[in-house]
Amino acid sequence: MDDAIATFILDQMADALIFATVDGKIAGWNGASTALFGFEKGEAIGESLDLIIPPHLRNAHWAGFDSAVKAGQLKLNGRPTLTRATHKTGRRLYVEMSFALVRSSDCVVGSVAVARDATERVERERAKAAR
């Protein structure tokens, strides 16, 4: 696939796509990431993933991230998980995310996450359960 076509696909997909290097710096951020998290691409690139991770989840996130990079394997094996994230405004989101490690030859060079907003669904389910 042509690099330009790949870029168009990634920029125009409906789900947020975030690529982070092994040190946790954001190196890829598509338009859906901006729509979901509120940060423009230029605000996100080069920043730590802490940009979108709520403070109370950061220790657990980094323990899992570092372990996955070191072992070259993910605990969830690509299965989506529901987690919390933070919007630029400080608003808390529920996001459904799936992760993959990105390799170059035999070396892990980063991770990629695909995310979608699940806030409305989770809040609707919680309201229904509270009735």
Image: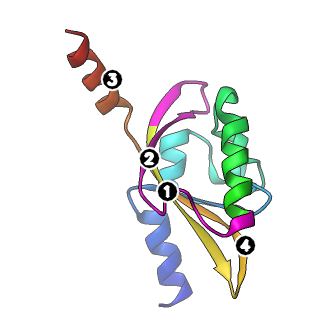
Which residue bears the numbered disc 4? 109
Q: Is residue 44 left or right of residue 124?
A: right
Q: Are marks 3 and 2 in contact (CB under 8 Å)?
A: no
Pointer 3 or 4: first along the chain: 4
**Does residue 83 show up magenta in the picture?**
yes
Q: Of marks 2 and 1, which one's residue comes earlier in the chain?
A: 1
> Image point 48% across, 42% down: which residue?
36
Q: Is residue 63 left or right of residue 113?
A: right
The answer to which of marks 1 and 4 sits earlier in the sequence is: 1
The secondary structure type at the circle numbered 1 is loop
The CA distance from mark 1 to mark 4 is: 19 Å
Residue at 47 percent across and 90 percent down: it is: 1
Measured as percent of width and height from the top left, residue 92 is found at 53, 26
Q: Which residue is mark 3?
A: 123
Q: Magenta span covers which residues?
A: 70-94
Of the 4 image quadrants, the one containing the C terminus is: top left
Taking depth in this image into account, of 46 and 99 the one nearest to the observer is: 99
Residue 88, quarter of the rendered image:
top right
Q: Which residue is mark 1?
A: 76
